[in-house]
Image (tube, rainbow, N blue to C red):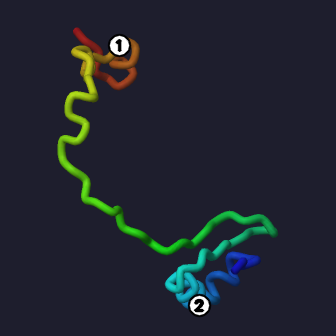
Amino acid sequence: MTVNSISEAKAHFSALIEEVCKGNDVVIGRAGKPIAILTPFTRQRKPRAAGALRGKIRIGSDFDVLPDDVASAFGAARA
C-alpha cells in the first residue's frame, strides 16, 4: 500500500496500522517519492548476553587524555 502524502497518512493512520498488523509494509511518500516505510515490529530472537564482546575490544591507555587544543576549547586546559 502506498500513501501519496503525509497528510493522507495522518488521516488514515489507524487503517495503516491495521495493514501493518496484517504483516504488510506501508510506504509513505512526499511529492511522489517514498520517504518512509512502516513495517511490523519483530523482537530479537535471543536476548543479548552481557560481556559478549569481552576480549574483542581494547581501549587505549590514553583514552581520557585530550589534546591541548581540544581541552582548551572546552575550558579544560592543563595548567
* The quarter of the displayed image where residue 54 is located: top left
Residue at 33% over, 19% down: 71
* Viewport quadrant of the N terminus: bottom right
Q: Which mark is residue 47?
A: none
Tag 1: amino acid: Pro
Q: Nearer the viewer, residue 37 or 62?
A: 37
Where in the figure is residue 34, as x and y percent of width and height? 72, 65
For the residue pair 33 and 64, the one nearer the viewer reads as 33
Residue plotted at (72% across, 70% down)? 29
Point out residue 7 in the picture as x, y percentages from the top left corner. Answer: 69, 81
For mark 2, does the 10 Å Cα neighbourhood hold few (<14), some (14 to 19), or many (20 or more) residues? few
Q: In the structure shown, which secondary structural element does the residue marked by tag 1 occupy? A: loop
With respect to residue 7, does 49 lie above or below? above
The residue that disc 1 covers is 67
Q: Earlier in the sequence, mark 1 or mark 2?
A: 2
Q: Which residue is situated farthest in the front direction here?
A: 45
Numbered disc 2: secondary structure: helix
In the image, what residue type sits under mark 2? Ala
Q: Can you tell which quarter of the image residue 77 is in?
A: top left
Tell whether 40 sits left or right of 68: right
* Label 2 sits on residue: 15
Name the residue rendered at 28%, 60% in the picture. 46
Q: Is residue 59 above or below residue 78?
A: below
Q: Nearer the viewer, mark 1 or mark 2?
A: 2
Residue 55 is situated, as x and y percent measured from the top left of the image, at 21, 28
* Disc 1 from disc 2: Cα separation: 55 Å
Specify the quadrant of the image occupied by residue 76.
top left
